[in-house]
């Protein structure tokens, strides 16, 4: 008995830091001899992680409630300072007020002063993940990324289901490679931040790329369209850039001829054009024929490219007014102004090809300034030893 007690004491001393002893039971046959207790051994980091997670969730709920109350009080004070109605002040009014009261020249937007609702500032917190017995609900909890690995398991299961479906078609002799793929036009994959927000846990760049590779591998299967709904959950529709273009309505002159005006800039040059319908291709620049104003062939091609791209050569007359800048900058400014004016004469389907061809995109390039201690913007002075 002494040996057994010594062994039991030694075991208890060795596991003193990580062992949790359940209440001892007495054996009816051995009197007060304690029976062997069941130990639940867990490491200190794991215990701290479990306790910190439970405490952090409770603390965050109380903390966010306090922050919401302070936000509402601060919003009323800010509305009174700016002469706004505290009940109807919007988030846009709050942002403009903060920019006015606390002007900042920091390039990083996240470092600038903000005043937003706490639910927008603080990330979402996952609910308590343990039952009453202290065990986690999800079997992937101890991986540290249970949501991510659950998502990977589900995605791979969908991948296997597609392969099983294809194998059944092969057995019946109905398999064909001529199938309809998943339509991904006009959409994009979720970004890493959007996926982390969906999973309510942080993921690394490697995990994000691994997940996208699994989805793209699924899309290479011939019958991936049977899981189109699952794939599209991780896609976001992209905004059509062509709809952002401002199209001026057509106007009529005293003769009933439709015309439209457009403006454009390139470097320091500014151009304004007026395009008239039912013309014969006459183009003037500052009252002169464009062949005389632009003797170089390169500038003439820049000027005529919008009409050539839309197959409208000889269908319009155009009057241009341009000032400042050089010959190349003036031709670029006229080209942009011409493209914007032609939007009123074309259909909606032709706007997107124009944007992709670069006709509606301003050229932001300017001449680089000279640097002190140098001969030019990039050129250095000739080095002389003596």
Image (tube, rainbow, N blue to C red):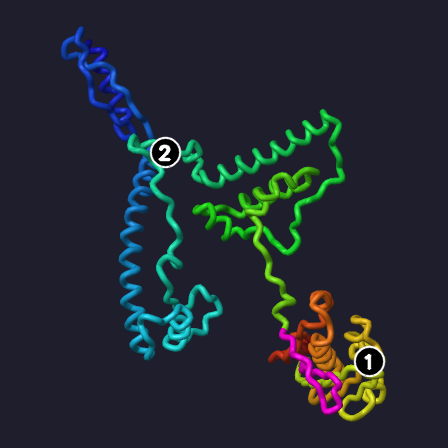
Under tag 1, what secondary structure?
A: helix
Quadrant location, the N terminus: top left
**Residue 25: image location, x then y, percent:** 19, 17
Of labels 2 and 1, earlier in sequence is 2
Circle 1 residues within 10 Å: few <14, some 14–19, many ≥20: some
- Residue 321 is one of the magenta-drawn residues: no
Q: Is residue 320 visible?
A: yes
**Residue 363: image location, x then y, percent:** 67, 74
Observer-nearest residue: 267 or 348? 348
Q: Which mark is residue 69?
A: none
Residue 119, placed above or below residue 365: above
Q: Is residue 383 visible?
A: no
Q: Please state if 194 lies on the left or on the right of 314 as rendered.
A: left
Q: Residue beneath label 2, please?
A: 136
Q: Which residues are magenta?
A: 246-264
Quadrant location, the C terminus: bottom right
């Amino acid at each position: 008995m002494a040996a057994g007690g010594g062994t039991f004491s030694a075991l208890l001393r060795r596991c003193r830091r990580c062992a949790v002893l359940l209440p001892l039971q007495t054996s009816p046959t051995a009197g007060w001899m304690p029976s062997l207790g069941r130990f639940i051994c867990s490491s200190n980091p794991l215990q701290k992680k479990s306790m910190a997670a439970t405490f952090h969730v409770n603390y965050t709920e109380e903390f966010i409630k306090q922050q919401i109350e302070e936000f509402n009080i601060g919003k009323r004070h800010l509305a009174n300072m700016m002469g706004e109605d505290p009940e109807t002040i919007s988030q846009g009014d709050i942002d403009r007020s903060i920019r006015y009261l606390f002007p900042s020249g920091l390039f990083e937007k996240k470092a600038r002063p903000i005043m937003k609702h706490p639910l927008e500032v603080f990330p979402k917190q996952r609910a308590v993940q343990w039952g009453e017995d202290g065990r986690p609900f999800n079997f992937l909890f101890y991986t540290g990324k249970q949501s991510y690995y659950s998502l990977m398991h589900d995605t791979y299961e969908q991948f296997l289901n597609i392969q099983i479906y294809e194998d059944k078609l092969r057995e019946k002799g109905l398999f064909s490679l001529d199938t309809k793929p998943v339509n991904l036009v006009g959409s994009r994959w979720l970004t890493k931040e959007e996926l982390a927000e969906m999973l309510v846990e942080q993921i690394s760049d490697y995990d994000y790329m691994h997940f996208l590779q699994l989805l793209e591998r699924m899309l290479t299967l011939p019958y991936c369209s049977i899981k189109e709904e699952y794939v599209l959950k991780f896609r976001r529709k992209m905004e059509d850039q062509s709809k952002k273009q401002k199209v001026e309505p057509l106007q009529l002159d005293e003769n009933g001829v439709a015309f439209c005006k457009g403006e454009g800039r390139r470097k320091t040059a500014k151009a304004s054009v007026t395009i008239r319908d039912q013309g014969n291709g006459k183009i003037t620049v500052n009252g002169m024929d464009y062949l005389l104003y632009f003797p170089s062939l390169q500038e003439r091609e820049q000027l005529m490219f919008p009409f050539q791209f839309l197959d409208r050569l000889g269908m319009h007359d155009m009057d241009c007014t341009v000032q400042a800048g050089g010959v190349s900058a003036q031709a670029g400014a006229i080209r942009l102004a011409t493209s914007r004016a032609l939007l009123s004469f074309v259909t909606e389907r032709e706007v997107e090809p124009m944007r992709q061809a670069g006709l509606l995109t301003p050229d932001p390039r300017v001449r680089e300034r000279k640097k002190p201690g140098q001969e030019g913007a990039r050129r250095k002075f000739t080095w002389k030893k003596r």
